[in-house]
Amino acid sequence: MAAADGGASARKEIIQTALILSGLTAFEFLIAFVWRDVSAAVGISMETGLFMKNLLFIILTLFKAFYIVAYFMHLKHEIRRLAVTIVLPFLFIIWLIIGMMIEGTFWGSRSNPDEQTSAYKVELVEDLG
Amino acid sequence: MADVSVDPKALQEGERPIFQASWGKLFMWFFLVSDAFTFSGLLIAYGALRVNAIAEGYNWALPEEVFTHAPILHEVFHIDAPLIFVGIMTFILILSSVTMVLAVEAGHRKARAEVQKWVFWTIIGGIAFLSCQAYEWYHFISGTGLHMNEETHQFESGGMMLKASLLEQTMEEGGPTVVGLEESKMIVFYPGGTKHFYEGQAHGHGGDHGEDHGDGHGADVLGLRNGAEITSSVAIDKIMKFAHHSHDGTYVLHMEDVVAEDNLKSKSENKLALKPLLPKGTSYEDIVSVPVYAQLSTSLDTIRLVMRNGYEISLPSVVDDLKKPGVVMTAEGKVKSLNEDGYYPAQGGSSMLANQYGRKAFANLFFFVTGFHGTHVFSGVVLLVILYFNVRRGVYDKRGHYEMTEKIGLYWHFVDLVWVFVFTFFYLV
């Protein structure tokens, strides 16, 4: 990051990153508005379309995150072991996401096996002993 | 101990700066990692509650239905512009990130005037973003799609938050009152049809309600957990008959007993039949114990209340009920009164207690996560203002480096980074 060329190359990188981020965001908006029509035109079901849309959003978000962290926050230009030290802890977050997304579907009435067989017993009766 | 000699090489090794970054920047990074964990926790909580709500059979708010306001388009042209405004906010934050990184770059060259210029524009971007957020919160709190025609006093496209006890009243009148749109979702309420109703304190003479579950309970008012009170003696008798007494005068009802009793009744009287055709895991609680947001058909006269959860009230007596005081709630949970002309103002919106878009957790987490992010933006603006004046005074020229710009820049980009995720999970997915 030496200012040998008066920072011209650094500025070029900044502008490129900004354009990429704007482009990705614009693309996300495009998807948000057209995904229903597209999935109908292609002939996939609403649910599959929704799943694919959300997956695409998450992938695009990760791309945006990468560009912000790597170029705006200069992590790409830092020494590699610093970058690894910062990024590695987020493996735990991936674990937490997977865990909570699965676990979340089993809360509430679904946490009680009796309730699943009984259509009209609709919520847990607290044990007031 | 004295035999242990200190290896000078090991000491040197320890002092070698392994990250080749200054302490200031390193600690900013470590702070940001911990802050990122906090935001991750919040966003994962949102995801887990959302997944849970869907698994339980509830609707979750659709962002394109919630965030439909954009300045001028809404106020002047009355056009719904879903997601447009949040798009503008996102671009504002990206642009402010660009100006920030340009300031950092200028700082490397110690170009004071340039740093000052770019920091200034970053401050403007931050303030613009916060203003946008204020606008968005205002419309989130006050609600979407509520227009009452002032001349005809008719709801053109809107709804109102109904007090839970309205439904209770219609139930106490007996007979099926709430009917789902689809056969598979049909749900018929009858007096005190939920366990929730029965979980309350009995206030009667004598004070001792006994454990006989039968007559002689002596209660004439049943205060419910949701704040409502049942005074109908018929309803109280019925409740007490099935209630399981527990300590401090609380009663709990088991649904099976009521259903069994009612199936018998329905054969003879052909009424009060409970048809438990709820979607698996559906709770009545959502329908009756919190303020219910209902979409009205065109006027109060042809009453048809369609609730967010897909249920519908189409009982003529609801029309009369609606004209009683105390059935319409504000988003804050307060009861609305009729205006001079005898109509309720349109009411919807969001609060921590209830929101018109569905599950309570949606608004709660929206407030918390975007609020927490907004707090970060605000802190960032404060830091940038301090930076701006320091740059202007030449503090960093005296110090010989512009590292402070880099540190605050890291923080500012982090705020942008968080927004990228908030934007995806609250507005897009």
Image (spheres, coloured by chain):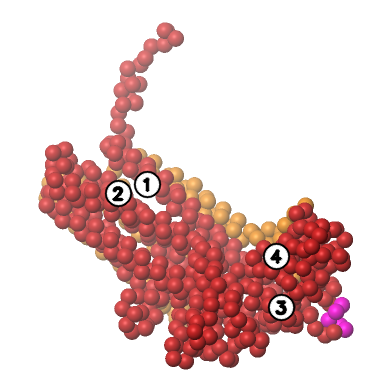
Chain colours: A orange, B red
Kindly identify the amino acid type of the residue bearing the numbered disc 4: Gly
**Marked residue nearer the N-terminal end (2 or 4):** 4
Residue stretch rendered in magenta on the structure: B264-268
Residue occupied by mark 3: B171
Nearer the camera: disc 4 or disc 1? 4
Q: Are marks 1 and 2 in contact (CB under 8 Å)?
A: yes
Q: Residues within 10 Å of mark 3 (few under 14, many from 20)?
A: many
Q: Most prominent secondary structure in the magenta stretch?
A: helix
Q: CA distance from mark 1 to mark 3?
A: 54 Å
Residue pushed farthest top? B2
**Marked residue nearer the N-terminal end (4 or 1):** 1
Q: CA distance from mark 1 to mark 2?
A: 8 Å
Residue visible at 82% across and 85% down in the picture: B270
Nearer to me, B41 or A47 = B41
Residue B46 colored magenta?
Answer: no
Disc number for residue B410 = 2
Residue occupied by mark 1: B32
Kindly identify the amino acid type of the residue bearing the numbered disc 3: Met
Q: Is residue A63 above or below residue B321?
A: above
Kindly identify the amino acid type of the residue bearing the numbered disc 2: Leu
State the image coordinates of residue A97 (x, y, percent, origin top left).
52, 54
